[in-house]
Image (spheres, helix red, strand yellow):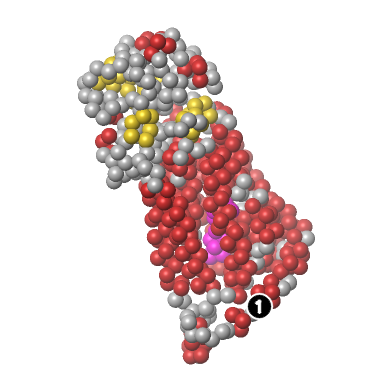
Amino acid sequence: THIITHITRTYMKSAITQIERRFDLSSSLIGLIDGSFEMGNLLFLAVVSHFGAKLHRPRLIAMGCFLMALGSFLTGLPHFFMGRYTFDTVIQGASVNQSVSPCLDPLKETEVPETITLLGPMFGFLLGSLCARLYVDIGYVNLESVTITPKDARWVGAWWLGFLVSSVIMLLSGIPFWFLPRSLPKQGQEGELSPSTTTQDRPGNGHATPHQTMRLAEIAKGFIPSLKKLLSTPVYFLLLCGSILKFNSFIGLLTFKAKYMEQQFGQSAARANFLIGVLNLPVVALGIFLGGLLMKRFKLGVVSGAQLSFVTSFIAYLILLLQFGTKCDNVRVAGLTISYNGTPGVVYNGKLLLSECNRKCSCSAGEWDPVCSDNGITYTSPCLAGCSDSTGYGKNTVFHNCSCVLYSPAPGGSMSVTLGQCPRRPECSRSFSFYMAVSVLSSFINSLGTTPGYMVIIRCIKPELKSLALGIQTLVMRTLGKCLNVWRCALRRLHVIEFLDIFIEVKISNVTLLLNSLGGIPAPVYFGALIDSTCLRWGIKKCGGRGACRMYDSNMYR
């Protein structure tokens, strides 16, 4: 169940780019949607975590699975009511060796006929990678008529498919829990349960157990005083604030990591999600396990554990700073990052898209159907490239007699352009390899301090407050989208602690929810707003207004 819930949660992050393009949203708005996705989980977690230990846990788990299945299904449902996805292009359905004049025609819109718990995030990103490879309207359109590729800024993958898949899996996983008894016998006591006990646990028997007759007021008694004692513990409060700051940064990085790899290094969404799933997350699981092993091997105490957690986090941040020097130059786009004669210089003024070579073509500055010339310069549309003829069909269309290409002639003197942005330079591939190596190393070193930091929280809190402390810390991690069960399993195997059976009995209040909301939910919003500020070219919605960003300033984005 943990694995499947994390598949759903992580898939949302992997599909952010696809949803952003499909609905023409800004990064800040898509960040708000991502935060809202987590917020819904946390609102129910606050109630279930407090009262769940006293109620029928298996049925609560089953109802949670059913509710998440419904939510995941509803998330993917809009795809079936919005019609087929359309994107801006000058390509017509049957233009084979036909002389056309894109220079004289305005843009036309063509409708295209339509460790173990970390396995969850890993499978979530892999599912996102698979769905991003599939065209959004797969099964409804002839894919040969689709003139864009997964690396195109207009490409939208089958974002809805992952939500439907996770919905079905979540529904199936919840069914067995519904038929489980209220409590299971402990190891070695399987034969000690009396028939009456089994009968009481059987659904629908009509007998109320003492737990079932307990009033909610009695369950909640003593909760507020315990919370006050916990938050009055200086060490724990400082650790909690540190977790808020730490996860605030990491959730922003995690949410937009795939998008960053797309925009900075020219990777497709499918490849970006795949690499995150098979490289970053496995080393995090390994680091968590090795961190627990270090605690046991060297018998680290509270102070030593805190020092190890601090040192690993500090080193990881220093390594992360190396990514600021890992870059790819901006794509050379005429009128945006260079002038039409090839002079570099980033501009945010859309009027500079027009030049003497295309001024008489009646082009719209809002067009975005990029074409590439042999001189390595990308033009935002065939019209703005000054082209007058075309040959070929679909993705193989070639435009000829492009007057703007003469401003910066290709070595062979060609005046033709092909569909799509020009590829990145070879050194960009080397930069991307270095970026991934730094990212993986930083993730591993940072995760080494996770278990020691967790142990510090356990050992610096009074025994009667441990479950509440773990609950608050769990909610921080839930906000990030990770699960403390990884630590629980690893620590049990290493015999570091023996009292984690109370982990389920966590208690969380509205104050706790507020504190931990500061640890991650707003992060995608302001990270997205910062990303929006680096946009060079915005798309245009069908009904007018600003759509999704088509191109970012790589230097500012970094």
Where does residue 17 sit, x and y in percent of width and height? 46, 40
| Quadrant housing residue 542 | top left
| One can see residue 418 in this view | yes
Along the line of sight, the residue nearer the viewer: 437 or 378: 378
Left or right: 410 with respect to 284? left
Q: Which residues are magenta?
A: 479-490
**320 vs 413: above or below:** below
Residue found 53% across the figure and 61% down from its top: 486
Where does residue 89 sit, x and y in percent of width and height? 35, 28
| Residue 236 among those drawn in magenta | no
Mark 1, other Cα within 10 Å: few <14 / some 14–19 / many ≥20: few
**198 vs 320: above or below:** below
Mark 1: amino acid? Arg
Left or right: 106 with respect to 276? left
Residue found 37% across the figure and 45% down from its top: 158
Residue found 42% across the figure and 36% down from its top: 267
Quadrant occupied by the C terminus: top right
Residue designated by label 1: 215
| One can see residue 278 in this view | no
SS for dot 1:
loop
Q: Main secondary structure of the magenta part?
A: helix
| Quadrant housing residue 96 | top left
